[in-house]
Amino acid sequence: MKTVNDFNFKNKKALIRVDFNVPLDEAQKVTDATRIEAAKPTILKVLEDGGSAVLMSHLGRPSGVEEKFSLKHIVDSVSDIIGVQVKFVDNCVGESVEEAVTNLQNGEVLLLENLRFHSEEKAGDKDFAAQLAKNGDIYVNDAFGTAHRAHASTTIIAEFFPEAKCFGLLLAKEIESLEKVLGSSEKPVTAILGGSKVSSKITIIENILDKIDHLIIGGGMSFTFIKAMGGSVGNSICENDKLDLALSILKQAEEKGVKVHLPVDVIAADDFSNDAKTQIVDIKNIPDGWEGLDAGPKTNVGFSYVIAQSKTILWNGPIGVFEMPKFAKGTIELGNAVADATEDGAFSLVGGGDSVAAVKQFGFEKKVSYVSTGGGAMLESLEGKTLPGIAAMLA
Ligand code: AMP
């Protein structure tokens, strides 16, 4: 796997696919610059070598050219973060772009307009990729968030740089972190899966069962398992058509020697609301009219104990409705346990949508080993799929 560290960019133009799909407020100001910050080390490596950087990204889901999705809105943020006044060109292919690229000097950074203003980007159009490829000498992919898409700028373009292509530092870190968890991981390996539904995590479970020692199942998806095992889950979220599937997962886990840990108690509420009345109940005996919205105290102790013994930890999905403060305790205690284990030397990877949001919201971001930047790309990797953006770089 080649990264930017294997190249010297002196007098070279690096064409870098970044993921600057950042949230903007109504005044078109960036409200969360995490993704820009994440691309900084790769851009600085190119500049410090004595090269220049041409940045390309998508923003939002425009249909054709839509001013509100123009990347011109983020030029100031990128300039502040990189520490260089970034130049901008109002297209990503064509004459104006060729001219801007030709005029680009070493040490300079040029941001191209939103790739998705051209429908050819998402279509993975080869001619469009060929035009994009004219914008640099070395192609760098640093966009993990779109690595699961075979788009022109993420995948197809790589074939125009048979020798001069490499991963950016962010993408390399994502790949390494996944490898640490699912590849040559130090045992015991624990996967914590939460979130609302078993159905959305089934492929992940099937893919990781061979690689883990402990499986902690929490959150909404645990009720399908509890009901399948004969428990009463009251009004808790439950996929009645997945009961057999839940039993089959438990059987597969047993056959493979994976210890499954389910909640033993829950915070049950009489309404899906932060103002609901609550009581702590045995998870197998949730009264009718009540629904489990967070892990109970015994569960939190049990889960924390398993995590404390672990050397490698993967966490995907919250174990309660953490968006409501009343039901956030389980997810916070779990985060604390993962943070403590990390401090004691375990490797911890947090990935996939809502667990990343929870980790950020409760301040665990710096206390775990790695927080993935790619929701869908992370989930597909955990499902065992080869991401087209990564495969294209290795071809
Ligand atoms: P997912 O997208 O499948 O990872 O699910 C994340 C969502 O699961 C979050 O929005 C949580 O609020 C929700 N969730 C977690 N635990 C529960 C629960 N016990 N009941 C209902 N929803 C839950």
Image (cartoon, rainbow, N blue to C red):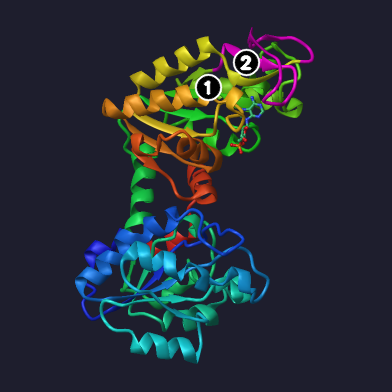
Residue holding disc 1: 329
Q: Residue furthest right?
A: 289
Residue holding disc 2: 267
Front residue of 77/100: it is 77
Q: Quadrant of ligand 1?
A: top right
Picture coordinates of residue 34, whole percent (x, y): 43, 53
Front residue of 185/56: it is 56
Q: Which residue is drawn at 60% across and 75% down?
A: 117
Q: Which amino acid does label 1 sit on?
A: Lys
Picture coordinates of residue 82, whole percent (x, y): 33, 65
Q: Residue 153 carries which label?
A: none
Q: Which residue is drawn at 21% across and 75% down?
A: 50
Query: Quadrant location of residue 2?
Result: bottom left
From the viewer's perspective, tell me whether residue 283 is left or right of residue 341.
right
Work out which quarter of the rendered image holds the C terminus and state it. Answer: bottom left
Q: Residue at x 63, y 64 (%)?
A: 61
Tell me, yes or no, whether the two marked residues, 1 and 2, touch with CB atoms within 8 Å. Answer: yes
Span colored in magenta: 262-289
